Image: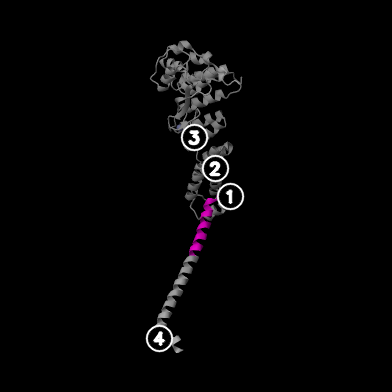
Amino acid sequence: MNSFFIEFRDPLFSIIVFFSIIFVITFFSYWWNKYKRNEDSKYLDKFLKQFSSIPSKDELKVLISSGDLSEKSWLILANSYYKSGNYEKCIEIYNEILGINNSKNRLETMFLLGKTYLKAGFLERSKQVFLSILKTNPRTPEALKSLFLVYEQMRDYKSALDVLEPLDELGGDIVLESSYLRVMAILNETKISQDEKSQKVLGIYKGSHQLAYLVFEYLFHHNPSLAWENFDNSKCELLSDILWKIEPKDLNLDIISQNGYLRELYSARGDVSLAKSSNTFEFDVLIKLGGKAKATLMFEYMCDDCKTLHPFVFHRCPSCHAIDSVNVEFGLCKDFYKDVGNGNNSFQ
Ligand SMILES: [Zn+2]
C-alpha cells in the first residue's frame, strides 16, 4: 500500500513539484497575456473611436482649452478639415483657438478663419475678420487681397476699388485688377442700357488690351455688329468658343473671309467653304467630314497660371484667383443636337 505514496524525500516528489510549479506559472502567464491582450484591444478601440467620429463643439472646447495638443497641431488639423470641405469644423477650431487668452498664433488664425468664411460663402463674416486684421495691421497684403475678393463676391465694386489703393502703395501691380473691377462694375450696373455698357467696356478694352474674353463675350452676346466692328484678330484662338456659338445670322462674312483662322473655323462649322484643310486637327477633321457626321467641338477652359482645367468658363480662376488667365481648349465630340432641328425627333 505504501508503494502508492511518494515519500517527502523521494526525488520523484521533487520532480512532480517542479513540473507543477512550471504548469502553474505557464497557466498564469497564458491567462495574464490573454487578459492584457483583451485590455489593449479595448483601449485601442476606444482610442480609434475618437478619430472615427468628429468631436462635437463642446468636446473641441474642452480639448483645445486643456492644452494637451499645441496650437500648431490644431491648425494642421483645421487645415485637413478645410481641405476635405468640412468648413464648419474648421471654423469651430479657429474660433476656439482665438478664444484662448494670449494665443501665440492669433493673427495667423484670424487670417485662416477669414479665408475659411470666404470659401464657405459667409461673406459678411469674412469681411469683418479681414477688416479686424487690417485695423491693427493695415500693411498686410494678403489680408488686403482677400478683402478685395470678398468685396468682389459681394459685388461691392466701389469698396473693392478702395482696397486697391493701399495695395498700390504696397507695390502691388493693380492695373489688371483695376480694369477688371471697372468692367465688372459696368456689366452689373442696372441703370444704364446695354448699348452704353457695350461702349464703356469697349473703351476700357481699347485702353488696356486686357480682358478680351470678358469684353467680347458681352459684346458678341448683346451687340454682335459692334463686336465685329472692333474685332481683335489677335484674339481669335482665345475667343474660339464664343465665335463657334455665334448665330449664323450674326456672322460678318467680310471679316471672316479675311482671317485665316476664322475661315477654317466657320468652314469646319459648315457656314462657309473658304478652307479645304486646316493645321488645327479638329477643324481639319470637321472640314473633311463636310457635315456628314454628327460631330462638333466641345470646349474646356484652362487657367494659364495654375494650369487647372475647368468645364466652365471663368473670368477669375476659381483655383488660384488669377484674372484674365482663361485659355480655351477644344476637342471633337458627338453632336447630340444635329438632327433636332431636322425633325428626326418627331413622334410622327
Ligand atoms: Zn488658376
Question: Which residue is at 55% across, 17% downward?
Answer: 342
Circle 1 SS class: helix
Front: mark 2 or 3: 2
Q: Dots 2 and 3: beta carbons under 8 Å?
A: no
Instruction: Inspect the image, locate mark 3, and give the three-letter code of the amino acid beneath it.
Output: Lys
Q: Is residue 111 above or below residue 292?
A: below
Q: Which residues are magenta?
A: 36-58
Q: Which residue is mark 2?
A: 87
Please give the label number shown on residue 10: 4
Tell me how far mark 1 sits from mark 3, CA to CA: 31 Å
Towards the viewer: 249 or 236: 249
Q: Is residue 260 magenta?
A: no
Q: Residues within 10 Å of mark 1 (few under 14, many from 20)?
A: few
Instruction: Inspect the image, locate mark 2, and give the three-letter code of the amino acid beneath it.
Output: Tyr
The percent position of residue 178, horizontal first and vertical second, equals 49, 27
Tell me how far mark 2 sits from mark 3, CA to CA: 21 Å
Quarter holding the C terminus? top right
Tell me how far mark 4 sits from mark 2, CA to CA: 80 Å
Going from N to C along the chain, the mark reached first, 4 or 2, is 4
